[in-house]
Amino acid sequence: MAVTNQPGRYDPSDFQTKLCDCCEDCGTCMYGFFCFPCLGCSIASDMDECCLCGTGMPIRAVYRTRYNIRGSLCKDYLSAVFCSFCATCQLKRDIDRRKAQGIF
């Protein structure tokens, strides 16, 4: 019998905010705008990764896999390349919300 689904704790979900919902958290938006590398480092620190890994497709894919969020590597890549600022802010917003909910 072929395994078609990976075991997981949660049903597939979505990110808790949309890609361009920067106004949902203006503090994170400003943090990313004025110091994008610092925001990436903060994300990497939250996820116990190397500071250089906080922005881009790989960290987004790891996060999606960890929390069983719908998407694909292709979507992660396109978001990271064409909307890197928005994608990074979305990831930080989601981390902060999951921390507040006690599920991070």
Image (cartoon, rainbow, N blue to C red):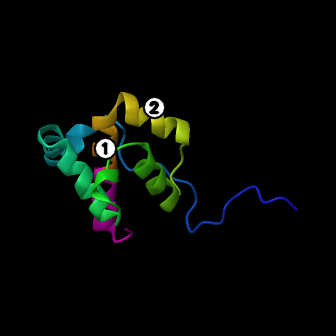
SS state under label 2: helix
Q: On the image, which quarter does residue 36 sit in?
A: top left
The amino acid at mark 1 is Thr
Q: Which residues are magenta?
A: 92-104
Q: Is residue 21 above or below residue 67?
A: above
Residue 95 appears in which quarter of the rendering?
bottom left
First along the sequence among labels 1 and 2: 2
Q: Residue at x 35, y 45 (%)?
A: 17
Q: Residue 12 in magenta? A: no
The Cα atoms of the two marked residues, 1 and 2, are separated by 12 Å
Q: Within the magenta stretch, is there residue 99?
A: yes
Residue 97 picture quarter: bottom left
| Crowd class of label 2 (few under 14; some 14 to 19; many from 20; radius 10 Å) | some
What SS does tag 1 mark?
Answer: helix
Residue drawn at x 39%, y 36% is 80
Q: Horizontal and vertical percent for residue 54?
A: 32, 51
Mark 1, residue position: 88
Give amino acid for label 2.
Leu
Which quadrant of the figure contains the C terminus?
bottom left
- Residue at 88% of width from left, 62% of height from top? 1
User: In this picture, is 78 found above or below 25?
Assistant: above
At x 24%, y 38%, the residue is 22
Q: Which mark is residue 78?
A: 2
Q: Are marks 1 and 2 in contact (CB under 8 Å)?
A: no
